[in-house]
Structures are given as structure tokens and as C-alpha cells.
Amino acid sequence: MNDSVLVVPLTAGHADEVIAIYRAGIDEGNATFETAAPTWAEFDAAKLPEHRFAAVDEAGRVLGWVAAARVSRRRAYAGVVEHSVYVRPGAHGRGVASVLLKALIGSTEAAGIWTIQSGIFPENTASLAVHERAGFRVIGIRERVGLQHGRWRDVVLVERRSPVVV
């Protein structure tokens, strides 16, 4: 990875770039079922502030972001979050997603969170590979779980169980 990439807390100051990167992921077609990017207010309300990070270059430009959300408000699931990680087009292959996942794992473990989970389209092989390198494992496949542009899509469920939080 380029040594000039820095991970910082994701704040409202990153909003325009974060939403643009999200929109690029939507347009690419293998990142999410969403068809429109949220507003910053919607994004901000849905993501846990202490578990969201931006990777920025030496000029402060956002190269990617990671954020987590509660899976449930039920007490039994207090240690489980679902995450998303997105990388700016043109910044792929630089280790941005890896460094972001490392930051997320560190913050969640420090907070006592024992499981990070996500759903990834099987065609998104780069995301599956980076998650595997970060210690995530495939726990199943939800077949034909949703329609996207008139086509049924599968989703690979991945999770990382913390070896530290028990």
C-alpha cells in the first residue's frame, strides 16, 4: 500500500466524497442493492460514529471509507455490527480496503463487539478476497435474495468473529 494513505475518523467534512464513492459503487453494479446514494444526513444517522473511517491521501482526498451499523437493538446482538467498505475508482489495488478493515476491527474490538458481518455479491471477488485476508469467513450464501435491475442476485454472507472479545 502507498505509505501516504492515512486512516482518519470519518466526519461530515468527508460527506461529499463519501457519498460520491458510494454512488460510484452503486453505478458499478456489484457493491449493493441500493439504486441511489443516501444523503449525508441519512448516512450519518445509520452509521455508528465510533466505527467509521476514511482513508485519505496526502492531499486529504478520500480514497475509501468503512462504516458499521447495528444489526439489531436487541441486547443479545449488542456485539454484532454490519459493515460496508467502499474504495474510490482509481484507488483500487492500493490496499485501501485492507487498511480500512484493520481500523474497523480495532475500533470494534476495543468497544467489545464480537462479530462484524456483511453481505457481498459473489461477483465482487476483490471484496471477498480482501475480507478473507482480514479474517472474515464465508458463513453462507443467500440465493436469489433480491432483484437488481430485473435480475435475481445472490449474496455471500461473511463474518469475522473476534478472537479477543469473548
Image (cartoon, rainbow, N blue to C red):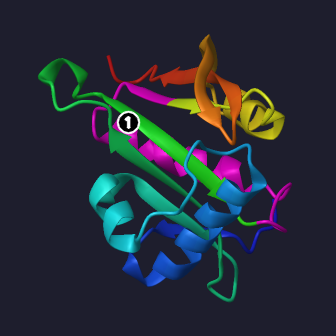
Q: Is residue 132 magenta?
A: no
**Quadrant in which the N terminus appears:** bottom right
106 shown above or below 24: above
Q: Report the residue that reaches farthest toward the front.
A: 150
Q: Which of 40 and 152 is in front in this view?
A: 152
Query: SS class of the residue under badge 1?
Result: helix
Total labels drawn? 1
Residue 64 visible, this angle? no
Q: Where is residue 159 in the image (x, y as percent from the top left)?
A: 53, 22
Residue at position x 38%, y 52% from top?
51
Q: Where is residue 158 in the image (x, y as percent from the top left)?
A: 58, 23
**Residue numbers of the magenta segment:** 89-117
Q: Horizontal placement of 86 versus 42: left or right?
A: right
Q: Report the residue that reaches farthest toward the bottom.
A: 59
**Quadrant in which the C terminus appears:** top left
Residue at position x 61%, y 44% from top?
32
Instruction: Give the quarter of the image for residue 123.
Output: top right
Q: Horizontal placement of 75 versus 162: left or right?
A: left
- The amino acid sitting under disc 1 is Glu
Residue at position x 64%, y 55% from top?
86
Q: Report the residue that reaches farthest toward the top.
A: 140
The residue where tag 1 is placed is 109
134 shown above or below 27: above
Q: Nearer the viewer, residue 81 or 101?
A: 81
Q: Position of residue 115 (x, y in %)?
A: 41, 25
Residue 24 visible, this angle? yes
Residue at position x 44%, y 23% from top?
162
Q: Nearer the viewer, residue 29 or 99?
A: 29
Q: Report the residue that reaches farthest toward the left.
A: 75
